[in-house]
Image: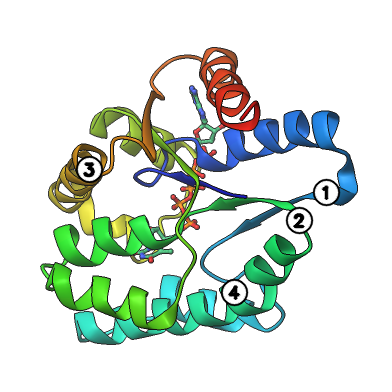
């Protein structure tokens, strides 16, 4: 079982992932659930995360390929082994991030990137929780935390295109991608997510 959490920067993914992880651990046991994130959550991945978030890259394809390198290592070192052991994998950011940011955000071609996903045999999530928050709210949350990373510095217009991307993806895959109104309080958002998890896991 693969559950992903998506959304623009500052949507509250980490905050909610922590809460969802606690719910899943309570229901299925600590040993049966893992919480991971992209980019970088694999042995050696910190270097790549730093490169992606802190280094000036001159071409959008460099960014794309680095995210894909990161995903290959993360998927085949962490995600797939856990799925094969029957675990529930909770992952912050995954393939939809690449589509929303690199396709809608940077303007790279959708079909080519989807072909790369297929070729790479990345497992498709069973459920994607898209935390949708107004852009201004997200920017406020990011700013209140201090220093911006390279991608966060791209500004409101870029984030707006990324949000459009998530909207398109939700319309395209309505059974997999659930929109969660993330402008509510932390507890209210967590409650909605708990309901979504219940629906998924009772099958
Ligand atoms: N990227 C990633 C790509 O371009 N392509 C890809 O393929 C992939 C995988 C990763 C960057 O890389 C890009 C996307 C990203 O720009 P990241 O740091 O991993 O960067 O991801 P971010 O989205 O930037 O992580 P953030 O930590 O900024 O955002 P979160 O996790 O969505 O938000 P969170 O939980 O840290 O909360 C942010 C702040 O808001 C508060 C929190 O307390 C915190 O201060 N908050 C709330 N406040 C009020 N009400 C709520 N409901 C709140 N929920 C959280």
Q: How many marks?
A: 4
User: Going from the N terminus, do you reach mark 2 or mark 4 first?
Assistant: 4
Q: Nearer the viewer, mark 2 or mark 4?
A: 2
Q: Residue at x 47, y 81 (%)?
A: 51
> Disc 2 vs disc 3: which is toward the camera?
2
Q: Are marks 2 and 3 in contact (CB under 8 Å)?
A: no
Instruction: Using the numbered discs, state the Cα–Cα distance from disc 2 to disc 3 in whole angstroms.
Output: 33 Å
Residue ID for mark 1: 32
Q: Tell me: is circle 1 under 8 Å from ligand 1.
A: no
- Residue depth check, mark 1 versus mark 4: number of the one nearer the observer: 1
Left of 50 or right of it: where is 117? left
Measure how far apart labels 1 and 3 are at the Cα level: 32 Å
Q: CA distance from mark 2 to mark 1?
A: 7 Å
- Bin the neighbour count of mark 2 within 10 Å (Cα to Cα): few under 14, some 14-19, many 20 and up: few
Residue at (68, 61) in percent of width and height: 83
How far across and down, in percent of the image, does residue 8 sit? 34, 45
Q: Position of residue 48 (x, y in %)?
A: 53, 81
Separation of marks 2 and 4 at Cα, in angstroms: 17 Å
- Camera-nearest label, 1 or 3: 1
User: Residues under labels 4 and 3: Cα distance?
Assistant: 25 Å
Residue at disc 4, secondary structure: helix
* Residue that carries the numbered disc 4 in the rendered image: 74
Q: Residue at horizontal 45%, vertical 58%?
A: 124
* 157 displayed left or right of 151: left
**Disc 2 on helix, strand or loop?**
loop
* SS assignment at label 3: helix
Q: Which mark is residue 186?
A: none
Instruction: Kindly indicate whether the residue at mark 1 contacts the one at mark 2 (C-beta within 8 angstroms).
Output: yes
In front: label 4 or label 3 = 4
Query: Is residue 168 in view?
Result: yes
Is residue 190 positioned above or below 128 on the image? above
Identify the residue under disc 3. 163
């Amino acid at each position: 079982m693969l559950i992903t959490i998506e959304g623009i920067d500052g949507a509250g993914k980490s905050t909610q992932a922590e809460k969802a992880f606690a719910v899943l651990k309570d229901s299925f046991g600590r040993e049966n659930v893992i919480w991971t994130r992209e980019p970088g959550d694999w042995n050696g991945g910190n270097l790549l995360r730093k490169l992606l978030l802190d280094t000036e890259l001159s071409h959008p394809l460099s960014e794309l390929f680095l995210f894909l390198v990161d995903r290959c290592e993360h998927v085949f070192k962490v995600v797939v082994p856990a799925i094969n052991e029957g675990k529930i994998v909770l992952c912050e950011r995954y393939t939809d991030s690449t589509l929303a940011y690199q396709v809608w955000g940077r303007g790279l071609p959708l079909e080519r990137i989807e072909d790369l996903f297929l070729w790479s045999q990345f497992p498709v999530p069973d459920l994607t929780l898209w935390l949708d928050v107004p852009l201004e709210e997200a920017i406020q949350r990011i700013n209140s935390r201090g220093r911006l990373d390279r991608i966060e510095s791209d500004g409101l217009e870029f984030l707006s295109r990324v949000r459009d991307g998530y909207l398109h993806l939700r319309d395209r895959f309505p059974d997999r991608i659930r929109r969660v109104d993330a402008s509510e309080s932390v507890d209210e958002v967590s409650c909605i997510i708990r309901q979504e998890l219940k629906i998924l896991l009772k099958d």
